[in-house]
Image: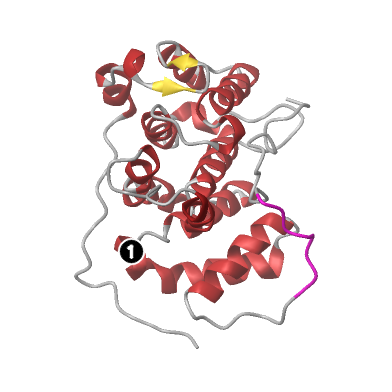
Amino acid sequence: MNHSRSNAGAPREPDLPPYQVVLAETDWGSLQTAFGNGEDLPKVLTRLLEPDPKAQVTALSELGEMVNHQSTIYEATAPVAMCVAGILTHPAAATPRPYRDVPIRAALLNWLVSTAYDASDEIAGRIEQWFPGFLTHDTTMASFRELRPMLYRAVSPFLQDSHEDVREAAVIAALILAEHPALAEHRDHLATHARRILDTSGDDPNRRVARKALEAWSHDVPDPEPLREECWDWGPHSDGRGDLEPPF
């Protein structure tokens, strides 16, 4: 079943504040990370803007350790995600990776994929079973999940990107973020991209995200196919490093 609705008149997602504003106005020292407070995060985030792709990839890996350690959402995760999303349009995001004809933008998007998955309905629902009240309005996870429409607006311009890696990472991020009820108007459009992932992608975790989105949104889904056995934390780039390993 394929439901179609017009997006005419649908409210526009809020814009992200400029990454410079987030960097300057966030009280980083007051925010929890995996290893203390976030006072060092501005320096790490600034390295994402360097022209050296090795420095950029190293910074992204450090961010994963600091605010995504063991697939956990910390107080500092939200402003870091806002900065990473805000940098997607920066010229530095087009820096090519050595040994790979892939712009750094793909790595930034895959970092957002991993982070969004850690706050997805699937993961949050599992944790809620063990810790009732986990998703109440005043928790760190709940606050991050409310950013999804804003993050979606930053990701969606890359759904039609000319580079395959960027395009696929943007689609997977958008599919996960679109679980937010405010983004329901976009699901029919995203279903087309999800089917393309199933038709063309060789990445099993990404194919799993696409299939689950189509199922959840009551769209036609191709016949099941054998995928690797699911694990508790198995999602797209679930270790946060799938796009960050050497060669740089």
Residue at the (49%, 26%) spot, across then down:
92
Q: Which amino acid does label 1 sit on?
A: Pro
Q: Which of 91 and 184 is in front in this view?
A: 184
Q: Nearer the viewer, residue 248 or 29?
A: 29
Q: Residues within 10 Å of mark 1 (few under 14, many from 20)?
A: few
61 sits to left or right of 159: right
Q: Is mark 1 on a helix, strand or loop?
A: helix
> Is residue 230 one of those drawn in magenta?
yes
User: Magenta-highlighted stretch: main secondary structure?
Assistant: loop
Picture layout, residue 101 above or below residue 155 = above
166 sits to left or right of 27: right
Q: Which of 20 and 25 is in front in this view?
A: 25
Image colouring: secondary structure
Q: Which of 211 and 124 is in front in this view?
A: 124
Return the x and y of residue 7 as percentages of the image width and height: 28, 72
Q: Mark 1 points at which residue?
A: 181
Over which residues does the magenta segment extend? 225-232
The answer to which quarter of the image holds residue 245 is top right
